């Protein structure tokens, strides 16, 4: 039996992907952790149940597409949408080892406190104060001179993450910032 004291959260399944049972997962650990021999664990009706990844492929900086062994259709995968993903603490510790400060992969939550810079003009939008992961589309919540601005945390929009300057450089869609501010002024 798996106990809550033996596991830790490593991510969350956001939504299904395509028709063959893949799931879009937001992970708090490098996707290389997910291997067929290491179970991931989910709470199914109050019982922690192990599942084994059949395949994993990165979808961007913050998400991966995960296919679980024995889950072969979108209908079967739907039961895992919005479920938290856990792993045995011992497996995570073995994977992470002494390299806790590895900065190869960045996760959305890691960027709280960073400055968001809009390219190509190099305009400082503001500070990322929160990350909204409540929907499939992860959002940065940015404090822009006291106004809350919502920016998609899409890897397609992120040009560079400078950890030394604590800055995220993004090419934002035309009008996105103005739309955010205009909506707030109309509320």
Image (tube, helix red, strand yellow):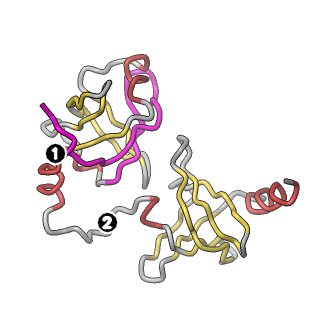
Q: Quadrant of the N terminus?
A: top left
Q: For the stretch drawn in magenta, what is the main secondary structure? A: strand
Residue at which label 2 appears:
104
Q: Nearer the viewer, residue 151 or 159?
A: 151
Queried whether the magenta region covers residue 27, the answer comes back as yes
Residue at which label 1 appears:
6
Q: Which residues are magenta?
A: 1-28
C-alpha distance separating marks 2 and 1:
27 Å
Queried whether the magenta region covers residue 11, the answer comes back as yes
Q: Determine the image quadrant of residue 4.
A: top left
Residue 171 in percent (x, y) is at 63, 64
Residue 39 in percent (x, y) is at 18, 36
- SS of the residue at dot 1? helix
Q: Nearer the viewer, residue 32 or 137?
A: 137
Classify residue 80 as left or right of residue 118: left
Within-10-Å neighbours for mark 2: few <14, some 14–19, many 20+: few
Indicate whether 94 appears above or below 58: below
Q: Determine the image quadrant of residue 157.
A: bottom right
Classify residue 165 as left or right of residue 10: right
């Amino acid at each position: 039996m798996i106990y809550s004291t033996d596991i830790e959260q490593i991510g969350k399944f956001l939504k299904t992907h395509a028709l063959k049972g893949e799931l879009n997962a937001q992970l708090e650990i490098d996707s290389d952790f997910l291997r067929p021999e290491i179970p991931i664990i989910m709470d199914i009706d109050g019982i922690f149940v192990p599942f084994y990844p059949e395949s994993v492929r990165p979808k961007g900086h913050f998400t991966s597409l995960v296919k679980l062994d024995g889950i072969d259709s979108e209908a079967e995968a739907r039961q895992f949408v919005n479920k938290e993903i856990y792993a045995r603490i011992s497996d995570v510790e073995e994977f992470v080892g002494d390299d806790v400060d590895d900065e190869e992969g960045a996760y959305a939550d890691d960027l709280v406190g960073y400055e968001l810079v809009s390219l190509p003009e190099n305009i400082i939008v503001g500070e990322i104060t929160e990350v909204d992961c409540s929907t499939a589309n992860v959002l940065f919540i940015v404090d822009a001179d006291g106004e809350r601005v919502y920016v998609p945390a899409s890897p397609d929009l992120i040009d560079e993450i400078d950890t030394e300057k604590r800055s995220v450089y993004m090419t934002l869609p035309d009008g996105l910032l103005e739309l955010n501010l205009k909506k707030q002024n109309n509320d």
